[in-house]
Image: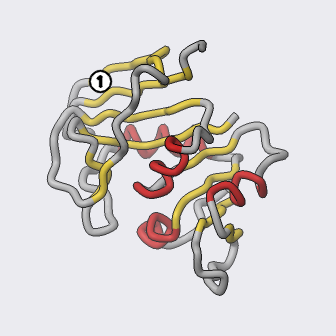
Amino acid sequence: MITLIAAIAKNNALGKNNDLIWHLPADLKRFRQLTTGHHIIMGRKTYESIGKPLPNRTTIIVSRNSAYYQEGCLLASSLENAIQMAKNEDIICIVGGEQIYRQALENDLVDMLDITLVHHEFEADAFFPEIDLSIWEEFSREDFKADEKNKFDYSFIKYQKRAS
């Protein structure tokens, strides 16, 4: 099972200046729950925005630079190569950024989308591709109101491929 995990705003914003735009502790907690114990695949820029391998996960970084090295991480030359490296895993998580998400969706490489939708629009320079509802159908949604820890309303939404 290959799951694409992303937190996106109403206008599909992902980030700005290689960083997150918002801080939602509930989303970070959920991300940790979804990815702990699994292989996570991310692009080099996303890795560099995090700055270190995440604990209790196998990090695969996709980079065209074959000399790129980060201790504690695996390097893949392409998204397809990264998926091949993790092929024996039950769950593989694709966690960003924009180019990796776009490749995964355009090349039909994922089985499920696990999206945190932040109910706000943000200025950004990285955006999530439009979710094609002729391909994907929502099968689970939890809605939450802003509170003292989470500044914005948000939803956890899972999509699966429509039966063809």
Is 138 situated above or below 46?
Answer: above
For the point 47% across and 49% down, the residue is 101
In the image, taking residue 48 as reference, residue 60 lies left or right, namely: right
Residue 55 falls in which quadrant of the image?
A: bottom right
For the point 28% across and 42% down, the residue is 12
| Of the pair 6 and 22, the residue shown nearer to us | 6
Residue 131 falls in which quadrant of the image?
A: top left
Image quadrant in which the N terminus is located: top right
| 10 Å crowding of disc 1: few (<14), some (14-19), many (20+) | some
In the image, taking residue 2 as reference, residue 8 lies left or right, namely: left
Residue 149 in view, yes or no? no
Q: Which residue is at the far right?
A: 88
Is 141 situated above or below 5?
Answer: above
Is 134 situated above or below 12?
Answer: above
Residue 46 lies, in percent from the top left, at 46, 64
Residue 62 in view, yes or no? yes
For the point 80% across and 47% down, the residue is 87
Q: Which residue is at the far bottom?
A: 67
Image quadrant in which the C terminus is located: top right
Residue 132 lies, in percent from the top left, at 40, 28
- Count of picture labels: 1
Identified by mark 1, the residue type is Phe
Q: Which residue is denoted by mark 1 in the rendering?
A: 144
In the image, taking residue 128 as reference, residue 75 lies left or right, namely: right
Is 97 situated above or below 9?
Answer: below
Mark 1 secondary-structure assignment: strand
